[in-house]
Image (spheres, grey):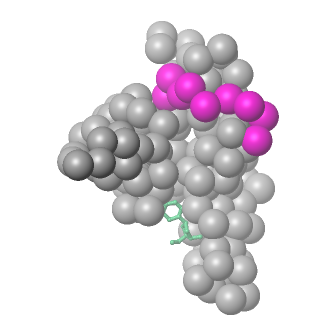
Amino acid sequence: MNQDQLDMLIAEATAVRERAHAPYSGYLVGAAVLTADGRVFAGCNVENASYGLSICAERSAVAAAVAAGCRTFSAIAVVTASHPPATPCGACRQVLAEFGDFPVILANVGGEWRTTTVGELLPAAFLPSALEPRP
Ligand code: THU
């Protein structure tokens, strides 16, 4: 991933964040996944009056990519208004780990950003490979 791709991914996540449905928390999150074939899929958090049904931005973006037939991810950007930029919740870390160990760009609307990886965010993840070898 080069700097142009990084900037583009943050811009996509920032744009979709504005479409978040977060009337209960007021906390808007945008995420954008870059796939191996160069496509970008965006997602925002979608809250619900039944609070526990709320969907995180990261999982929205992953679902959009998978629904389009793209499962090989090169990176994901997550944009919030938090300082420092917020990290994905535990559930989203597990969902990201399903698709490999790739860069995670954490950014905020103030222009701060840093990169980490799925592996750093969720060491010793439960992976699909755990289901394979049965004694
Ligand atoms: N949220 C996300 O979209 N991603 C995360 O990784 C953490 C939390 C959303 C869920 C809820 O709509 C709001 O942020 C406050 O928790």
Residue 119, image x, y percentages: 28, 38
Within the image, what quadrant is residue 82 found in?
bottom left
Q: Eyeballing the image, is 85 above or below 104?
A: below
Residue 56, image x, y percentages: 58, 62
Q: Nearer the viewer, residue 84 or 49?
A: 49
Residue 94, image x, y percentages: 41, 54
Q: Nearer the viewer, residue 83 or 117?
A: 117
Residue 50 seen in this snapshot:
yes
Q: Nearer the viewer, residue 67 or 53?
A: 67
77 left or right, relative to 69? left
Q: Eyeballing the image, is 3 above or below 77?
A: above
Residue drawn at x 37%, y 49% is 131
29 left or right, relative to 75? right
Q: Which residues are magenta?
A: 67-75
Residue drawn at x 30%, y 42% is 133
Residue 113 seen in this snapshot:
no
Q: Residue furthest front?
A: 135
Q: Is residue 69 covered in magenta?
A: yes
Residue drawn at x 46%, y 43% is 98
Residue 73, image x, y percentages: 54, 28
Q: How many marks?
A: 0
Q: Is residue 130 covered in magenta?
A: no
100 left or right, relative to 65? left
Q: Nearer the viewer, residue 129 or 90?
A: 129
129 left or right, relative to 44? left
Residue drawn at x 77%, y 56% is 19
Q: Residue furthest bottom?
A: 50
